[in-house]
Amino acid sequence: MDLRKFLGGDIELDLSTWNPIIKMPSIFGQIQISHPSDLNCDNFDAWSTPVCRWRNEWTRKEDGDELDWLRAKNGWGENESIAIFGTNKRATGYYIFTGSRQKLSPNSSALLVSDPIQCQEGDGRLNFRYWTSPGTKIRVCVRRPGSVKTCDCDWCSTEIIRGDPGPAEILIPGSILYEFEIVIEASHFDYDSFGFTGGMVILDDISYNAAAVYNCKDIPHVDPLPTISLATCQTVSCSFDLDECLNQIRSTGWRVEEGPVGNLHTGIRMGYKGNFIYAKGTETKILPLGPFSLSRQGILEFCYYIACRNTFLSLYATLKNYDRILLYKTEEISIKPHEWLCRQVILEEGEYEKLEITTENSTNPYAYIGLDNIRLLDPITFQDLCAQPEVEKETLQASKSLASLTAKMKPIKILSNVNYQKFLSRLVS
């Protein structure tokens, strides 16, 4: 296959070291890394560049990987990148690729293996940029040196199938108190549609980080709490300064204000933080928030201003397949009512059809109720859960510790290998 004809641009095999294939294991064994940064690699052993501590796996019949990684250089075409990888972002300089223009078994794979690591203290993180053609998949595994099969791994991440070019950030759960290797596996070169068969995967800018890689302490892995989705944050959190939030009050009877409103006795004398909304009179006003999904327990905080007796604000919740319930109702005003009060209410994990913040039972046509600063808080840290929602970041988290996953690991079927000559003839002839 002519790489430039297939991918366009200035892409070509890098022949600066005569052989573009990434090195194979040494017959004398591999040397342990001394620092996590030893596994950082962005030139992949091109001429006059730092040594890359990653290698191809031996190609063995029924006992290893099907394909090998080769080094290329220069960028490919923008139009081809959009059509094949779904992004116009491309690699520059040196990078590695693998694949086939022929449809292979979905289990056919290419393994990129790190040099041995004595141990890993706590969790480690592996980062890299990647480009995957339709149907291809990438995952990261941990195995002991001497293994040649992916099914010999002690742990594997979930598969990366979207988000090109990343970077992917793989959390490797620790501590790992034995010598191990990190394996990046590309597989599923079995696409056959729209005149395109096989598949291709490109990797660049690999980096690894851990607290220590020798004389490691046993620091157990703790699963991170689920993040709150951006859609939930946009639905629930509101400071009434943003257009998305202001759209929610249309046709509700609530009005937007930024300063004093109403009379001195039953009105609102000052704002809370910027814009706020208010309701006036005896008519019931409902602010609906929903539908939304809450992936973990949270705290709903809101601030209100009420300076008139017998005037109340209530919070109702309706979960999917459940009846509407009252979560909170404000108390009677104090002798010094002219102030903003903030309250917190626990929201359990679940699918919410809606929340309703409602004015109720007011008998005074001049009663004002102010509302502001609706947000979701972490019940442990009381930090804003929506301050930095991590919904667009391709972060793959381990779901269980290495020990529990090792006991449940299912074997992966690896088919017989093709040798390097066949692979090279398929890909670059």
Image: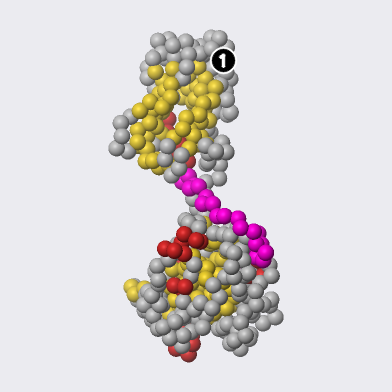
- Image point (37%, 38%), residue name: 352
Which quadrant holds residue 418? Answer: bottom left
Q: Nearer the viewer, residue 115 or 6?
A: 115
Left or right: where 297 falls relative to 341: left
**Can residue 84 be spotted in the picture?**
no
Q: Secondary structure at mark 1?
A: loop
The amino acid at mark 1 is His
Q: Mostly what secondary structure, the magenta segment?
A: loop
Does residue 270 belong to the magenta stretch?
no
Q: Nearer the viewer, residue 2 or 394?
A: 394
- Image point (54%, 28%), residue name: 275
Q: Is residue 35 above or below residue 22?
A: above
Query: Where does the image place residue 214, in percent across and percent down from the top left?
Result: 67, 66
Query: Where does the image place residue 258, in percent across and percent down from the top left?
Result: 55, 25
Does residue 227 belong to the magenta stretch?
yes
- Image point (43%, 21%), residue name: 329
- Image point (50%, 61%), residue name: 403
Q: Is residue 240 above or below residue 31?
A: above
Q: How many marks?
A: 1
**Can residue 327 be spotted in the picture?**
yes
Q: Residues within 10 Å of mark 1 (few under 14, many from 20)?
A: some
Query: Where does the image place residue 88, in percent across and percent down from the top left?
Result: 51, 65
Location of mark 1 (residue)? 338
Query: Where does the image place residue 181, in percent across and percent down from the top left?
Result: 56, 71
Part of the protein shown in magenta: 204-231
